[in-house]
Amino acid sequence: MDVANSIEELVGNTPIVKLSRFGAALSHNLFGKCEFLNPGGSVKDRIAFHMVSKAERSGSLRPGGTIVEATAGNTGIGLALVAALRGYKLITVVSQKVSQDKVKFLQALKAEVVVCPSGKSIEDPEHFMNRARAIAESQGAWLADQFNNADNIEVHYKTTGPEIWRQTEGAVDVLVVGVGTGGTLTGAGRYLKERKRELKIVLADPVGSLLADLVQGKAGGRSSSYIVEGIGQDFVPGNFDLSLVDDVIQVSDKDAIACARDLFAAEGMFVGSSSGCIAHAARAYCGKTSGAAKNVVAILPDGGRGYLSTIYDATWMAEKLPPSQ
Ligand SMILES: Cc1ncc(COP(=O)(O)O)c(C=O)c1O
């Protein structure tokens, strides 16, 4: 029978789709890697299964144990799938910025959700990452720690990068990617650069994040709040290898959200705000790059259903991003 033995087998091997209409006016070829088609709806299923499997093998996660993770939602959703399949308890720690859709989704998947105030600095004990560490320590639980866990990078090095290489038959020239933890950029980017030295990696960064400045060696900037979820930071995550980045494109909330809508209108792809941000950056990169036609692959990290009460809600949008802005 042509069947999978478990949903785990359906993680990864996501398709790449040519964005023919979205990128119609460009002199380069634009493609989207559809990470939103993973079983849990995001790129994070890859790291959830891999980090847990490695922790089981090393003995740091025991049968029936508790997993704790600081997440923008998607890693929590991926971990909830693993927890259901393998019998773990899951505590997720999110910042208040995370959409109610994702919080409800996590709760429906049997995860406990601890919500921390947003806008706290990384030194503050109330920052969601510090709360997660404290909860894990107090409960003797395993902290997945996607921001520093090397298995996050490893799974992208072993799967996402090779998939892009194989699917494009080595013809990929540019990878456009956002950074939340840096796992996707560092793992897939490192693999692809090892195969093709001249390949360019473009960081798509929301306006308000400090990563663009930090990559360009500018210190002392101030972060500000922005709507796009899952990417951008005010510190350099342990899993982000800055040296891999060749170019940075900063994207406003307005452009990111407009682009998420464009992806549906043009391609029938219903995606989240980080995909809009990355697709906008990819289109902008193509627009400013001359010369022979290049093959540009944009990672589309998650789908739009986690944002029904935010960027896809007209009332919410009118309040957060009035048309005059
Ligand atoms: C919606 C979304 N997009 C993109 C990313 C970034 O991926 P990475 O953590 O591999 O940098 C994340 C995760 O942080 C995310 O939740």
Image (cartoon, rainbow, N blue to C red):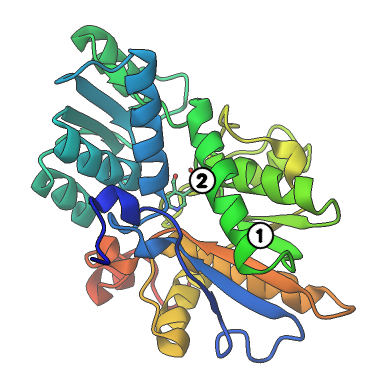
Q: Does the residue labelled 1 lie within 8 Å of ligand 1?
A: no
Residue under the point 54% across and 52% down:
160
Mark 2: few, some, or many residues within 10 Å (few <14, many ≥20)? Answer: few
Looking at the picture, how far across and down is residue 64, in whole percent?
14, 21
Residue farthest along the front direction in this orientation: 1
Quarter of the picture holding the N terminus: bottom left
Residue 292, label in figure:
none
Q: Please name whichever residue, 70 or 164, is drawn nearer the observer in this view of the structure.
A: 164
Looking at the picture, how far across and down is residue 142, in whole percent?
29, 18
Quarter assignment of residue 21: bottom right
- Secondary structure of residue under mark 1: helix
Please state which amino acid type lies under the numbered disc 1. Trp
Q: In this view, does 251 lie to the left or right of 15?
A: right
- Secondary structure of residue under mark 2: loop
Residue under the point 84% across and 51% down:
197
Q: Distance between the residues labelled 1 and 2?
A: 36 Å
Q: Between label 1 and label 2, give the one nearer the viewer.
A: 1
Looking at the picture, how far across and down is residue 137, in whole percent?
28, 9
Mark 1: few, some, or many residues within 10 Å (few <14, many ≥20)? Answer: some
Task: Please say whether residue 250 is visible from this viewpoint.
Answer: no
Q: Please name whichever residue, 132 or 300, is drawn nearer the observer in this view of the structure.
A: 300
Residue under the point 37% across and 55% down:
42
Looking at the picture, how far across and down is residue 282, in whole percent?
65, 69
Residue under the point 43% across and 49% down:
230
Q: Is residue 252 above or below residue 30?
A: above
Q: Mark 2 points at which residue?
A: 224
Please state which amino acid type lies under the numbered disc 2. Ser
Q: Please name whichever residue, 135 or 82, is drawn nearer the observer in this view of the structure.
A: 82
Residue 165, label in figure:
1
